[in-house]
Image: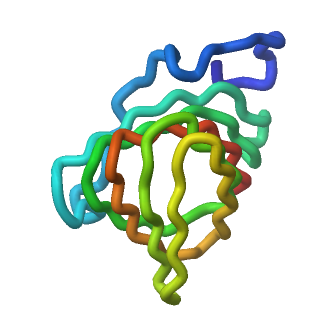
């Protein structure tokens, strides 16, 4: 489901099947976190993407894209290079900015629905 030709649909996020989306080993700070995801829709030019992303417990680093996401389940602490810290859990909406360098401490498997502009 990754093109703009996808017809309207509804999906129960908690039951969605996700595919492995391996992390770069250099991103892993501690633990053995595993990422899975599913692209639900993207614009033909790839500028906007909607999907589901999940990560198991551990600590990872990332360089963010422009993103809005809603946490469906699980929890994490997102620490920014400038010292800001955001805690997220079920029902929380978060906005990340392109280029932000972050460290994610995932406490319990986190599943989110996201929109990325890139």
Q: Nearer the viewer, residue 77 or 1?
A: 77
Residue at image point 72% right, 24% down: 3
| Colouring | rainbow
Q: Is residue 60 above or below residue 40?
A: below
- Residue 65 is situated, as x and y percent measured from the top left of the image, at 61, 61
**Residue 9, image quadrant:** top right
- In this view of the protein, which residue sits in the foreground, 43 or 96? 96
Q: Residue at x 39, y 69 (%)?
A: 103
Q: Position of residue 69 (x, y in %)?
A: 65, 47
Q: Where is residue 36? Give x, y as percent.
A: 39, 33
- Quadrant, the N terminus: top right
Q: Looking at the picture, how far across and down is residue 12, in whole percent?
A: 61, 15
Q: Where 7 sits versus 26, above or below? A: above
Q: Name the residue: 58% across, 22% down.
A: 13
Of residues 62 and 103, the one nearer the viewer is 103
Residue at the spot 25% in from the left edge and 54% down from the top edge: 58
């Amino acid at each position: 489901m990754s093109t703009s030709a996808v017809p309207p649909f509804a999906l129960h996020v908690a039951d969605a099947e996700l595919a492995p989306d391996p992390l770069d080993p250099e991103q892993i700070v501690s633990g053995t976190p595993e990422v899975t995801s599913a692209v639900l829709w993207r614009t033909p030019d790839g500028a906007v993407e909607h999907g589901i992303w999940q990560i198991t417990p551990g600590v990872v680093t990332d360089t963010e894209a422009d993103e809005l996401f809603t946490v469906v389940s699980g929890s994490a602490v997102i620490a920014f290079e400038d010292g800001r810290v955001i805690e997220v859990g079920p029902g929380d909406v978060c906005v990340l900015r392109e280029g932000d360098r972050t460290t994610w401490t995932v406490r319990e498997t986190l599943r989110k629905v996201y929109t990325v502009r890139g």
